């Protein structure tokens, strides 16, 4: 039997779920996050269970440490070392702008030009050495790095994806000459073409590597001090886990750690309810994260951007994030126009209704004013935490209602409508903008604030089905419980398909699979628990963007003709058309090796009779309604609820607007039908 803790540290709350296999019980702790001291909130949540940490078999953690370090520019003092003549790779970037018609931007690279250094060497695009690596220039760069007092170094030499010998030698020498400096080489994190993207990915890893390693080391040490002797597992951006000892070295792979966990769980609950095509809608205290999950598998991208001008070229779940959470601050700008977010009140001071010093109105305050959240309701398990409705009313009145000439209720409704429209646009970005009809998907609403808004979001985008999982306020923590360990490997090819051979492709895929198997075996997985999937990244010869062509688990017999056939099939499925006359390029070969963890079996108990429901007045777009207020734990599988209604639980409040019908699924999920 394994007692497993799943932990998600968000901007406002830290969620901890404890699964005990003997009873199938899931226990929840939801406490305030502790900015700058994330381990404190994590341990506070674990201690609420009264289970000795030495009895835990696994601790799985989703974290925002790497993301925050990049966004807030609070990483290590980092330098870049590259081939002579390419010192400006970060400044030159791509010819794009933050706004389509804007003439200026606020781009600032993580490494300034003053800390970009060059060495004498050159490898061409085919991997042939044009100029040997100069030992003298390596020593000179080491001296310059020492004088610059850098803490971390990113090494990214031209065309090292085709031949990494120079880069490997340079990284080895810098580690020898500068033993106190962290060194990240591009061939270790991103051995792919695309000079700017490879450089930014390497720089980001170098920038966040030390903060991530320090944080995970502190978590591991504090857990060890209290009896936990195993490796902490960390969620990666690709939806798989990695041991903390490796996550520190490959910190760039954890940038979307928490949101990825929620997406994994949303896919699982959608599939369990017979809804394979879903869109995950994670509305927490700070942000709204949305992802497309067609066919029960989250869409994966080989490249994303954590901020303007900072593309990340590692496999990650394709998640769009906007600043629209329960803590998003509402204000009226100088033009007299209402704005909501992206600034958030966070956990300290938090929304005005939290009574922790916040005075500015947030989305959560608007929900309290409208009666969607009750001041008597207890949110989370934080000791001594109560809500103050009067403070919420005053914040909305002073900062929104009076400047706009509205009454408090109308102002609160305006805040909710504004936030909903921002989130609906994000849903359209991951669906309509990519050729998918949101009306054919179910929305999975989760996060502390998601279940309050998801039915209205469905109506806004034309979706007719909503799923609210059993623990929506802690679904990312649940995703940590059920995720598998996963490693991604990539080898650049860069040739036309007709120039490749089945034997060459087989060797690359076999080497990747073998490396993954050995790594998972070192992590304690047996051969029967290891799964292998191969992917080819391909494009037409003169196209800038590529597509991922699944190859399954078979690495043999991938002849040029078979690869071409699979590429055309995938291209047709995505774009509904093809150009059979164009030459096709095999850009890279990828292998995903997965270590299957033991499944989490949750037991859903059938409660007894309902207590008499309470009632309260709730304001919706069509006016005020007196609605029943139910407790989630009293709902029985198969039960049907007619909206409007409110369902409360310790980690979230579920708002069922008028013209909705809700059925309780056998696993505890709520399936909401929304009238169009």
Image (cartoon, grey):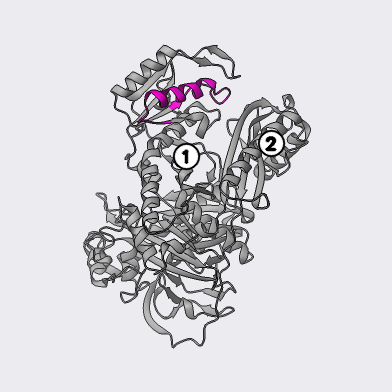
Q: Is 229 on the left or on the right of 269, as rendered?
A: left
Q: Which residue is mark 1?
A: 250
Q: Which residue is mark 2?
A: 510
On-image quarter of the N terminus: bottom right
**Residue found 62% across the figure and 65% down from its top:** 272
On-image quarter of the C terminus: bottom right
**Residue found 67% across the figure and 32% down from its top:** 508
- Find residue 124 and report its horizontal and vertical position in percent: 56, 17
Q: Judge whether 129 appears above or below 238 on screen.
A: above
Give, as a single range, the part of the protein colored magenta: 155-183
Q: Judge whether 639 appears above or below 436 on screen.
A: below
Badge 1: few (under 14), some or many (20 or more) residues near its Cα, within 10 Å? Answer: many
Badge 2: few (under 14), some or many (20 or more) residues near its Cα, within 10 Å? Answer: some
**Residue found 36% across the figure and 47% down from its top:** 215
- Find residue 253 and report its horizontal and vertical position in percent: 48, 42
Q: Which mark is residue 435?
A: none
């Amino acid at each position: 039997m394994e007692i497993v803790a799943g932990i998600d540290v968000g901007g406002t709350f830290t969620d901890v779920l404890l699964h005990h296999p003997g009873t199938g019980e899931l226990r929840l702790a939801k406490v305030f996050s502790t900015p700058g001291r994330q381990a404190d909130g994590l341990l506070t949540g674990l201690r609420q269970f009264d289970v000795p940490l030495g009895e835990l078999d696994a601790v799985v953690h989703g974290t925002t440490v790497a993301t925050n370090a990049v966004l807030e520019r609070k990483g290590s003092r980092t330098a870049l070392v590259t081939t002579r003549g390419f010192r400006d790779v970060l400044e030159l970037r791509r010819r794009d702008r933050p706004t389509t018609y804007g003439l200026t931007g606020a781009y600032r690279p993580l490494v300034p030009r003053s800390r970009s250094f060059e060495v004498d060497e050159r490898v061409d695009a085919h991997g042939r050495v044009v100029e040997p690596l100069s030992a003298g220039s390596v020593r000179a760069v080491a001296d310059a790095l020492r004088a610059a007092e850098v803490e971390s170094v990113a090494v990214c030499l031209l065309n090292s994806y085709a031949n990494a010998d120079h880069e490997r030698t340079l990284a080895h020498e810098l580690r020898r000459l500068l033993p106190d400096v962290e060194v990240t080489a591009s061939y270790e994190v991103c051995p792919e073409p695309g000079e700017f993207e490879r450089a930014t990915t390497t720089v980001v890893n170098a920038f966040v590597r030390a903060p991530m390693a320090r944080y995970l080391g502190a978590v591991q040490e504090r857990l060890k001090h209290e009896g936990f002797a195993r490796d902490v597992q960390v969620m990666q951006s690709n939806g798989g886990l990695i041991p903390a000892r490796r996550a520190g070295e490959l910190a760039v792979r954890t940038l979307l750690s928490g949101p990825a966990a929620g997406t994994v769980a949303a896919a699982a609950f959608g599939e369990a309810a017979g809804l394979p095509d879903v869109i995950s809608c994670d509305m927490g205290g700070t942000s709204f994260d949305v992802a497309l999950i067609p066919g029960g598998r989250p869409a994966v991208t080989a490249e994303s951007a954590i901020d303007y001008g900072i593309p990340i070229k590692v496999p990650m779940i394709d998640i769009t994030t906007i600043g629209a959470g329960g803590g998003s601050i509402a204000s009226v700008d100088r033009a007299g126009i209402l704005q909501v977010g992206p600034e958030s009140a966070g956990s300290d001071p938090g929304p005005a209704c939290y009574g922790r010093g916040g005075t500015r109105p947030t989305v959560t305050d608007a929900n309290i004013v409208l009666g969607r959240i009750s001041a008597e309701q207890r949110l989370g398990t934080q000791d001594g935490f109560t809500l103050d409705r009067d403070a919420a009313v005053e914040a909305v009145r002073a900062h929104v209602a009076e400047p706009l000439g509205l009454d408090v209720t109308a102002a609160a409704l305006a805040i909710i409508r504004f936030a909903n429209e921002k989130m609906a646009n994000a849903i359209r970005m991951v669906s309509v903008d990519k050729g998918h009809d949101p009306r054919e998907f179910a929305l999975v609403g989760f996060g502390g604030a998601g279940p309050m808004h998801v039915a209205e979001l469905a109506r806004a985008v034309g979706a007719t089905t909503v799923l609210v999982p059993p623990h929506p306020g802690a679904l990312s923590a649940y995703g940590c419980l059920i995720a598998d360990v996963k490693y991604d490997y990539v080898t650049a090819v860069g040739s036309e398909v007709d120039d490749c051979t089945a034997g060459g492709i087989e060797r690359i895929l076999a080497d990747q699979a073998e490396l993954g198997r050995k790594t998972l075996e070192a992590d304690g997985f047996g051969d029967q628990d290891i799964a292998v999937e191969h992917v080819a990244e391909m494009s037409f010869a003169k196209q800038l963007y590529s597509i991922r062509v699944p190859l399954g688990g078979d690495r043999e017999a991938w002849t040029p003709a078979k690869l071409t056939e699979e590429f055309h099939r995938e291209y047709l499925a995505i774009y509904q058309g093809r150009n059979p006359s164009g030459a096709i390029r095999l850009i890279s070969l990828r292998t995903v090796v997965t270590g299957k963890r033991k499944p989490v079996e949750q037991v859903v108990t059938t409660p007894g009779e309902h207590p008499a429901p309470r009632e309260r007045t709730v304001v919706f777009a069509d006016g005020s309604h007196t609605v029943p207020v139910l407790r989630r734990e009293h709902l029985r599988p198969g039960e049907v609820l007619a909206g409007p209604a409110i369902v409360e639980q310790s980690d979230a409040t579920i708002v069922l607007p008028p013209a909705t019908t809700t059925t309780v699924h056998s696993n505890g999920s709520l399936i909401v039908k929304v009238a169009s």
